[in-house]
Amino acid sequence: MATRWFVTGGAGFIGANFVRGLLARRRDSHVTVYDALTYAGHEISLDGCTRTGRFALVRGDVCDADALDAALRDASPDVIVHMAAESHVDRSIHGPAPFLRTNVDGTFRVLEAVRARPGLRVAVVSTDEVYGSLGPTGRFVEGMPLAPSSPYSASKAAADLLTLAYVHTYGLDAVITRCSNNYGPYQMPEKLIPLMILSALRDQPLPVYGDGMNVRDWIFVDDHCAGIELAAERGRAGREYNFGGECEKPNLEVVETILRKLDKPRSLIRFVTDRPGHDRRYAMDIARATEELGFRPSVDFETGMERTLRWYQDNLDWCAAVEDERHRTHMRANYERRLEAGAEPSADRAAPEETR
Ligand code: NAD
Ligand code: DAU
């Protein structure tokens, strides 16, 4: 079992949940977070970790090979969990360059660092979006051809392929995890669920792209973190593992659930211009992770949403801290024109449609 963990991107949404969970459950664990602290990485998300005496935060860029090497020398980990990334599809549409830099070149640097350290294991955290979009039926299975649609997912697919090439060519001890949409505490309010929660709490419009019938497979973040831990310790080198919540929902249903739970009116919904190239449906087949790793999602959507809603209501200070000028600039660029042209929901638009 691994005791010394090195988590790139550990100050982000999934990272913070992963690190907190590991430190709390495994008293023999030591965690080093290596994170550039971009707009998405926040030291406050790791508040309290230092008190364990088993935690270190190193501010560093995964593209900086020397800094990465120095941090790895100091940390001397058993395993790297590589989750540093530019993660937001909308931002990748506005400006792909940082996505290629961090997600492709950054992963290359991490793989090189692992190659220089025989015996070191790496779990590369990837996404279901590398598979592209599904029609109304079927699920993503490992081994399917990759067909990414956005600059974000293309950069993640490139990182996956590079990882597999390093296993094949250099015998690297690497596994890849691919997960569906996460939700839970510490997620930046640029993503659907926290954005809708905060907008509803503030009685501001809730911008739903297109017809609101795009389907995502929602997983509570703790379940994804459990899957990453299993794959990092038990996964077979060169293998990809799908994780998902077995919880498909159209976006509109998610948004309506939030409004209902917060006792806010449906009239806050605005149907706005669709995301270009918007993938219609994602759904994960998790049979491999279940059979080989013993993975099962354990938090149902109702419970996960209750926990998430409560967390955002109790942590408005955290929200204020992360909604800084970098965040506001993105929000203006992405929504100002959309909301000017947006429409309130009518009874017709609320009717569920067949997905393609
Ligand atoms: P996030 O945007 O919340 O966090 C990303 C973290 O990476 C931040 O702390 C940021 O500071 C750091 N980072 C960015 N560029 C860096 C660089 N050049 N060097 C070092 N650190 C850098 O993302 P997240 O939602 O926590 O996602 C984490 C990982 O999981 C990503 O690889 C993402 O592709 C993957 N993933 C996310 C989801 C999801 O639903 N959020 C689902 C499947 C997979
Ligand atoms: O599927 C895994 C992926 O999930 C991860 O790889 C990504 O890092 C993560 O950001 C997430 O990507 P999505 O694009 O699916 O997440 P997002 O929260 O941005 O959008 C979820 C759905 O909601 C999507 O169909 C677009 C829609 N949406 C999103 C926003 C921000 C809206 O309708 N309105 C919005 O304002």
Image: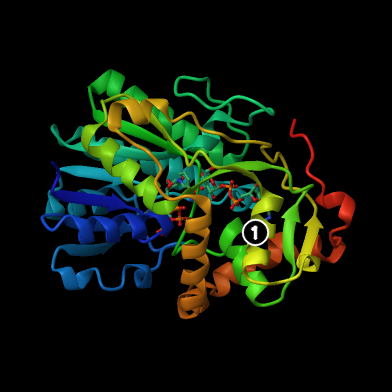
Q: Which residue was labeled with disc 1?
A: 257
Q: Count of labels shown? A: 1
Position of 259 with respect to 287 (left or right) is right
Front-lying residue, 42 or 281 = 281
Q: Residue at x 32, y 68 (%)?
A: 46
Residue type, label 1: Thr
Q: Is residue 140 above or below residue 29?
A: above
Q: Secondary structure at mark 1?
A: helix
Residue that lies at the very extreme toward the bottom in this rendered image: 317
Expressed as whole percent of the image width and height from the top left, the position of residue 124 reads: 34, 38
- Closer-to-camera residue (272/150): 272
State the residue at coordinates (69%, 37%).
280
Looking at this view, is 146 or 62 the one in front? 146
Task: Please name the residue shown 26% across and 73% down the image.
Answer: 48
Q: Give the vertical position of 151 relative to 6 (above or below).
A: above
In the picture, measured across the screen, residue 355 lies left or right of residue 317, that is: right
Give residue 261's quadrant in the image.
bottom right
* Residue 87 appearing in the image: no
Residue 293 is situated, as x and y percent measured from the top left of the image, at 29, 32
10 Å crowding of disc 1: few (<14), some (14-19), many (20+): some
Can you say whether 122 is above or below 309 in the image?
Answer: above
x and y, in percent, of residue 328 in the image: 61, 71
Residue 103: x %, y % from top left: 44, 43
